[in-house]
Image (tube, rainbow, N blue to C red):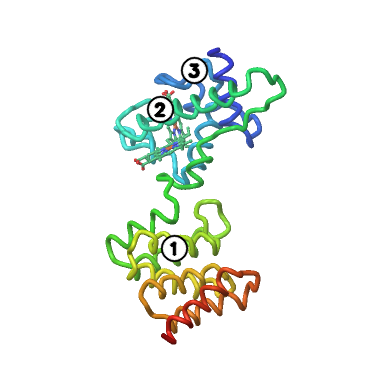
Amino acid sequence: MRSLTFALILSALLLPFSVAQAQGPFAEPKNLQVIPDTVKGSQLRQIMRRFSAALGEQCSYCHAPSEDGEGLDFESDANDKKRVTREMIKLVRHVNQVSASLYPDNPDHKPTSFVCTTCHRGQANPFLIEEVMNNQIAEGGTAAAQAKYLELKEEYYGSHTYDFTSFTLAEYANRLLISGDLTNALEMAKFSTEQFPQEAYAHSVLGNVYVRQRNLPEAITAFEASLAINPNQDGLRRQIERAKETMEQ
Ligand code: HEC
Ligand code: HEC
């Protein structure tokens, strides 16, 4: 089992890299506690590169500086991220074991490879954009959340680090609405229609916030904007009628 597990974790960690030459500190590792010490230097080098790429960080993120100030002391455990990473390696290994044993009666089942990037997507702390915005709202309100969103979009758009699609932003505003946080829901729903004027759902969410705020004229405007983009929304048509009836009463 151990060698199967090792083969699994290695193949998962190595995937896109070709075998490279072992060199320098990789040739004789002295302090491997989780990666088997039978690993070839060239493989260890690739694993370390994969870790760096998965987190979008340099080697120094996990490895402490040498005492003489020259480069890094790879053997040392002085940097706590190394301990955390050992736990992460065990976690990845465990999930790959689970995947490999899911269909014991189907020898053709090919387990999906599970790697650091599956979660990390180029960042050390694998936040979703929603969590980033929650944290920003808690600290500096919706203005801070919107500024952060635009800043991250500038930096990461096109990568897999954050989801900048129109639905996700509109759904974020909808979650705020569902949680009863109407003030922030309104600001984020407006932001979502500004960012994605062609996302029908963003206008619907904005309309729903207005309904909850009993601002029916604005709600109708927003619902109609949504209908103009996607006419196939009978439920929304009924909501508009209901809002108009209420206003006439
Ligand atoms: C995300 C954290 C992380 C990053 C980034 C990282 N490493 Fe490591 N590295 C580790 C961990 C954890 C170990 C020990 C693994 C074990 O105990 O089995 C290790 C072990 C090593 C070792 C073996 C040291 C020894 O003597 O035992 C070398 C060499 C090494 N890393 C080089 C590098 C290089 C070069 C880079 C940059 C390309 C790098 N690492 C990036 C976490 C990291
Ligand atoms: C199942 C998802 C998942 C996978 C797979 C995963 N991680 Fe993580 N990792 C996390 C989460 C979540 C955190 C943040 C934990 C916390 O709350 O501090 C984290 C934190 C870390 C940290 C600490 C970051 C910091 O700055 O505090 C390091 C280093 C790390 N992971 C390395 C790795 C490496 C290397 C791999 C692959 C061997 C890996 N992780 C695989 C979910 C994952």
- Residue 237 drawn at (x, y percent): 57, 74
Q: Do the residues labelled 3 and 1 touch (CB within 8 Å)?
A: no
Q: Is mark 3 within 8 Å of ligand 1?
A: yes
Tag in front: 3 or 1: 1
Q: Look at 43% across and 31% down and name the residue there.
A: 88
Q: Look at 51% across and 22% down and name the residue there.
A: 27
**Left or right placement of residue 156 versus residue 104 in this view:** left
**Splitting the image into four quadrants, where does ligand 2 fall?**
top left
Residue 41 quadrant: top right
Give 130 or 186, whichever is nearer the viewer. Answer: 186
Q: From this view, report whether residue 29 is shown above or below residue 220.
A: above
Measure how far apart labels 3 and 2 are at the Cα level. 12 Å
Tag 2 residue:
86
Tag 3 residue:
36
What amino acid is at disc 3?
A: Pro
Q: Which of marks 3 and 1 is nearer the N terminus?
A: 3
Q: Is mark 2 on a helix, strand or loop?
A: helix
- Residue 107 drawn at (x, y percent): 70, 19
Tag 1 residue:
174
Q: In this view, which residue lies farthest toward the left?
A: 139
Q: Is mark 1 on a helix, strand or loop?
A: helix
- Residue 92 drawn at (x, y percent): 49, 29
Measure how far apart labels 2 and 1 are at the Cα level. 38 Å
Image quarter hosting the C terminus: bottom left
